[in-house]
Image: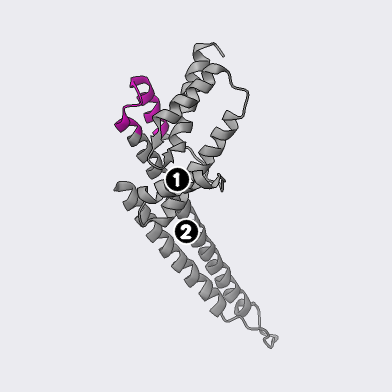
Amino acid sequence: MMISMLENVANFGTAVCGALAAYFWWKVAMENTPATKNLTAEMTNFDWLTRPLAAQARNNKMGATFASLGAALQVVVALLKLASLRFRQIGAMFASGNCGGTMRSRVLAAVVAVIATTSIAFADADTMAGIKAACTADWPGDYSMQEFCINNQVESYNHLVQINSGNQNGDEKAMLVKCLGDWKTATGSDWSMVEFCYKDQHEAYERLNGK
């Protein structure tokens, strides 16, 4: 609820900044700059030219400032969407009972630094169908979050495909199988949580084996 409210505030701020940027750039366009002027011997300055040019420069600067603020607020919106998705995933992990005390501490630490990069990713048709169905169910009517969720899930799926096709030993293969079983869903798997689970298990495995 809090994240959703902050998203709305950031979106409203973006709209306000866009309107202000448009206003100042409109003032630039409407500023009357004389193309020519008859000079006389008594004329000692060029205020007739420098004043409108200075006004244009000020308005240009203000327009660019508000446009930049609007762009920055959209970055905030994207991060808030990411935070919302991560909190939902972590909440699901706690609810499922798949994390002990040590892992809970590490999950809570990870919440503080929201980590992710969104990119266009690809999966086979059956996997994509399951992902779309899950994201649609998780975010009904919120198409922006559905798109974000799909990209996040498919990116994790592709990472897991790379891991599975790599040079794994028996223990590492068992970890992946366990995580896939732990995060099986009605539509397939929660690939983001499978990836999180595997990486967490693999890091602990390497520490225990002195790697």
Q: Residue at x 58, y 68 (%)?
A: 57
Nearest to N terminus: mark 1 or mark 2: 2
Q: Is residue 49 left or right of residue 142?
A: right
Residue 49 is situated, as x and y percent measured from the top left of the image, at 63, 78
- Numbered tag placed on residue 70 in the rendering: 2
Dot 2, crowdedness within 10 Å: few (<14), some or many (≥20)?
Answer: many
Amino acid carrying mark 2 in the image: Gly
Q: Main secondary structure of the magenta part?
A: helix
What residue does disc 1 label? 130
Q: Is residue 110 above or below residue 45?
A: above
SS class of the residue under badge 1? helix
Quadrant of the drawing holding the C terminus: top right
Q: Residue at x 30, y 47 (%)?
A: 2
Q: Are marks 1 and 2 in contact (CB under 8 Å)?
A: no
- Numbered tag placed on residue 150 in the rendering: none
Residue 17: within the magenta?
A: no
Q: Residue at x 33, y 21 (%)?
A: 101
Residue 31 is situated, as x and y percent measured from the top left of the image, at 55, 78
Q: CA distance from mark 1 to mark 2?
A: 36 Å
Colour mapping: one colour
> Can you tell which quarter of the image residue 56 is in?
bottom right
Q: Residue at x 48, y 22 (%)?
A: 175
Q: Is residue 54 above or below residue 153?
A: below
Range of the magenta residues?
A: 93-111
Residue 46 is situated, as x and y percent measured from the top left of the image, at 64, 77
Amino acid carrying mark 1 in the image: Gly
Dot 1, crowdedness within 10 Å: few (<14), some or many (≥20)?
Answer: some
Residue 109: within the magenta?
A: yes
Residue 39 is situated, as x and y percent measured from the top left of the image, at 69, 86
SS class of the residue under badge 2? helix
